[in-house]
Image (cartoon, helix red, strand yellow):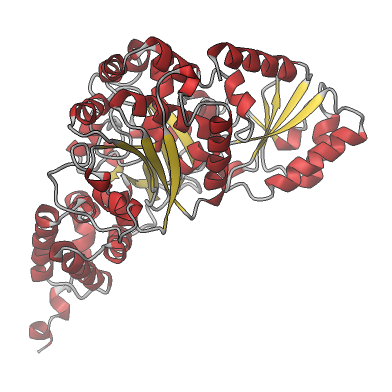
Amino acid sequence: MRVDDMRQRAEERRRYLDGFAHHLLVCAGLGCQGNEEIVAALNRAVNERGLADRVLVRRTGCMGLCALGPLVRVEPNTIVYQGVRPGDADEIVTALGRKPVTRLLLSPDLPFFTRQHKRVLALCGRIDPDHFDDYLAAGGYTAVSTALTAMRPAGVIRLIDDSGLRGRGGAGYPTGLKWATVAKAAGARKYLICNADEGDPGAFMDRAILEGTPHAVLEGMIIAAYAVGANSGYIYVRAEYPLAVQRLQRAMREAEHNNLLGHAICGSGFDLKLEIRLGAGAFVCGEETALIASVEGGRGLPRPRPPYPAERGLHGCPTLINNVETYANIPLIVTRGADWFAAAGTERSRGTKVFALSGKVRHTGLIEVDMGTTLGEIVNDIGGGVPDGRALKAVQTGGPSGGCIPADRLDTPVTYEDLGAVGSIMGSGGMIVIDETTCMVDMVRYFMQFCMEESCGKCAPCRVGTVQIHRLLGKFCEHRATPADLESLETLCDLVRETSLCGLGQSAPNPVRSALRFFRQEFLDRMVQPADTPEHNS
């Protein structure tokens, strides 16, 4: 598709959408149960009233506030209804242009909405992810046409580097530096991979982006491939995300049909072929080298680094690996510039970050905030605080590889550096709120069990160490632990952290170490008391 053709298609779609007086946008993500019934009921109500030429019912991606779903947004009034059921359709359609349905109404002034800064999620919940022209009408693929027709690969890399974008998959490695390494690596063939193997408990950021704006991820990958000189790529997504896979497959077909994938993209001399690879749900495959092994058809086992994938990755060739959110940021930077991107966030942690807010908080769901926003703002303002009058105890960030941050550290800014200073990590964006009813020993034992069961078993420190740490935590849970067990627990955490082969084992002790740092008394309270010892009883 030529650039002029894209512009014409986009303008035609905008005129078509503007021709309707009202739009009923239905959140249609995997987690929104009953959404298809709601869509059908709304369409039926519209047709029965003869409003098909004035009211358009559209499926969209995640609107964010999962706790109060299913959600329906009415445009152009920006009315949001919560907890919608198919039986509410008649009332919603009847109320169009009149007083809203009060019993379903969700205030647009809710801090959950007003305190966010949506960039990556800006189109989620606003366009139909299954409609190619919807993405075009919202400015989609403008960045691809700009990069491929008006920029050289080195210029694209320089732009990404100037923006300060860091990988959103967990480690926070500078994206521009990684791209430059792949571009400079020797080799006639290069690959790129999108890591969509989202395995953290309570995390659904990548899934929501893939379900809501799959074309944004494809667009970012096309630009990245052009910049580093890759002509083949893979999207590695777990099979537990069937709707994301379905929408990705459709988006790829549409992109190929419109000359945005395949041969001579946008009339340029650049070719790119992308394929989807389904993961079987192994947490370790989120690690780059294990992911590569799985894409190659082998068992997902990590290998020692160096060499790093940027130099020797898939099939021994230089390989660029970024995650879903990282790629989704690329079109925005190309279109709006490095300064625009860097205007949000902090000096070293620029831009915004998507989080899956869950646990003991009123408003669970998907959020996007500026880097540097404090944990307190996220939990108490956006999340609405802890329900049922209970007190906040801790916030766990970074998934099973992260740490538990106590309530008295809620002023901690969400940046790579500040989270690291309190013993946690950004991770891919999981954020679990813990209240006073939760025992931290039980909590970290749960995470250790997860890491123990997900260990690939290749290296002894992780294979054996996680089992022994879990066993020791069990002794604390059963009030059988001794001072020697506490000492062994701390020693083992350090050993596993320092000697494991890959990031799974190296980070597995993080929740335990942070809990010992901030909630040590709970471990002491779970130890054998002097009155219980055999010596005392004798």
Question: Which quadrant of the view contains residue 378?
Answer: top left
Q: Please name the residue shown 46% across and 28% down the image.
A: 263
Question: Is residue 51 something one can see in this rendering?
Answer: yes
Q: Is 378 above or below relative to 180? A: below
Q: Please name the residue shown 48% across and 18% down the image.
A: 267
Q: Is 135 above or below relative to 342? A: below
Q: Position of residue 319 (x, y in %)?
A: 27, 38
Q: Nearer the viewer, residue 491 or 119?
A: 119
Q: Position of residue 198 (x, y in %)?
A: 39, 48
Image quadrant in which the C terminus is located: bottom left
Q: Nearer the viewer, residue 526 or 366?
A: 366
Q: How many marks?
A: 0
Image quadrant in which the N terminus is located: top right
Q: Please name the residue shown 50% across and 16% down the image.
A: 142
Q: Is 67 above or below relative to 344? A: below
Q: Position of residue 337 (x, y in %)?
A: 37, 12
Position of 222 compared to 440: left or right? right
Q: Position of residue 519 (x, y in %)?
A: 22, 53
Question: Which quadrant of the view contains residue 493?
Answer: bottom left
